[in-house]
Amino acid sequence: MLNISLGTIIWTTVAFLVVLFILKKMAWKPILEGLKKREESIEGALKAAEDAKEEMAALQSNNEELLNKARAERDLLLKEAKEIKEGIISEAKTNAKLEGDKIVAQARETIKLEKAAAITELKTQVAALAIEVAEKVVKEKLSNDNKQQELVNNLIEEVTLN
Amino acid sequence: MTSKINTLKSFSSKFGLLIIAATFAFSFAGICSAQDHHEKINEHADDAADHENMHSEEGEGAPAGWKSWKSDGPGGFIMHHVADGHQMEWAGFQIPLPVMLWTDEGFQCFSSSNFYQEENEAHVHGMEGHAFSMGDEYIMINEVIYYLKENGGIHGIEEKVMKAEEADLLLAEIAILEKEKEKANTNDEKTSLNNEIAALSTEEKQLRKSAIITAPFDISITKNVLGLLLVLFLMVFIFLRVAKRYKKREGQAPKGIQNLFEPLILFVRDDIAVPSIGKQKADKFTPFLLSVFFFIWFANLLGLIPFLVGFNIAGTMSITLVLAVVVFVITTINGNKTYWGHMLAVPGVPKWVLILLTPIEILQMFIKPTVLMIRLTANITAGHIIILAFVSLIFLFGAGSEGAYWGVGAGSAIFMIFMYLIEFLVAFLQAYVFTLLAAIYFGSAVEEAHH
């Protein structure tokens, strides 16, 4: 136990060093390398996942931005469309009014003209009638000259031209 | 294929449990065996009363441990189990081991059963312990093999022992004369005393020379050497398999036996090597630290399996000495400028203090591995001694009465189980401590100066 035996020392030295060498070359080297490789690959995978996550987040914020932009554009478009619509409506209204007014004015003009024409025609007819009447009266009256004269005078007096 | 994987998986997961279960089974077996011994004691005691002759009743089957109890009491019994030997004892069987000797006539190899035989038992007066002679060529006293014929037979060895005792007496005489010389007043007295001392010391030297009992160079595969080889074989077997898995399953999750050892490999690398040495330089030392860690741990576990011949591998100074020397050599050849600078002249200390400090620092270089060696040996051996002491208690108290035998037996059993659990911890802890301190020494050797 506590006494030193040279034989044991020799056996231990030889066996231990041989095993140390064998293990170092054939066991610890591949084991430690394998561990390192695996750790690196895990680390790499984790990093890739983290990157992907970040990318995802970036993409998402991008999307959001895009969406916002689109929304704003849509709002703008709508607003413009509304404006245009209102513009068109109001223009149409004014146009319509103008047109209406114009039509009304034309109508009035026409009415006026028609009226004038009618009056003229009426006048002519009245005149013709009057003449006819007068002719008839005259024909009758003229049988009596005095009376004829008198009648004509009366008629003329009565008919007032407006 | 699947079934093979499953078997391996269950093997690895049950491996640890198996060790624990085996240990407990054996520890109970140990208690039972102790009971057998107890009965033998009683029988022998009866025989002794009847025939007053115990020796003839002992028979050939009596284990050597039991013989050492007979001759040296519990101390001898315990030391017999802790010490190295040229044979293994397992469940009452004696398994011989090869004895290899480098003698004056060349290499000799024979079975150790040539020694351990009743008819070869010898008594050497003046030498404590057991002696076995092998023909008239060799004699083994306390597991140390000496020449027999060259030393003049047993008688010649006894004479040499006496001569050594005489030499001891002469040394004592010389010491007395030295004291007288100091007290002497005149020069004449001094010279005469000097002459006397010189004469005595030459005589003493001659006696010492003739008292040397010559021995062949013993390179036998002893019990602990076999245990050592077993542990190293186990390590190669296990870790080559683990390494194969790493090669096969590159980048994949660990599996089977690989899964069993990966946490420990990572523990040594990440919790011992890297914090003590530093990340960049740890790679160089990690293989050695792993080897040492698993060697000590396996050796301790093997030594904990009761009645498996009682290996005491990490509790053998010759083996721990080699470990310590390897640690010392690695530390020394890797020592950089800062390390040596620190040792030879601690920076920032006044010059006159260095006169005191430098020798201490240099001494420390040797003390550190020595302490490693002693700590490991003492801790492992002490654990074995305590458990054996509890076994001895059963013998001691049980010899008196049946009640004491059962009472002490039960008490000892409880304490033994408790000690076993602690020993499991110690087995790991000592492997950890040795590896950690070795790593710290390596770390101090390669540490860069930090300003």
Image (spheres, rainbow, N blue to C red):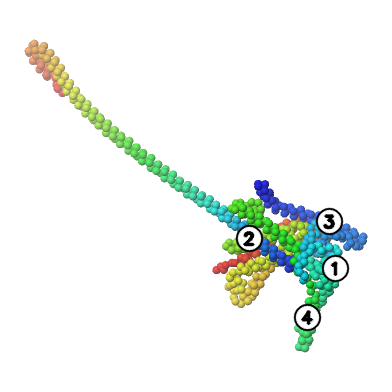
Q: Give x and y (percent) for residue A87.
A: 32, 38
Q: Secondary structure at mark 3?
A: helix
Task: Measure how far apart labels 4 and 2 are at the Cα level.
Answer: 56 Å
Q: Residues within 10 Å of mark 4 (few under 14, many from 20)?
A: some
In terms of depth relative to the viewer, which is nearer, B448 or B12?
Answer: B12
**Amino acid tagged 4:** Ser
Q: Which residue is mark 2?
A: A25
Q: Give x and y (percent) for residue A7.
A: 74, 67
Where on the picture, by quarter, is residue B23?
bottom right
Q: Give the number of the mark in front: 4 or 2.
A: 2
User: Of the residues under marks 3 and 4, which one precedes in the sequence?
Assistant: 3
Q: Residue at x 68, y 58 (%)?
A: B235
Q: Secondary structure at mark 1?
A: loop
Q: Secondary structure at mark 2?
A: helix
| Mark drawn on residue B36 | 3
Task: Measure how far apart labels 3 and 1 are at the Cα level.
Answer: 28 Å
Task: Measure how far apart labels 2 and 1 are at the Cα level.
Answer: 51 Å
**Amino acid tagged 2:** Lys
Q: Give the number of the mark in front: 3 or 1.
A: 1
Q: Residue at x 67, y 64 (%)?
A: A17
Q: In the rendered view, does B98 fall on the left or right side of B266?
A: right
Vertical arrangement, residue B395 with respect to residue B172, above or below: above
Residue B381 appears in the figure: no
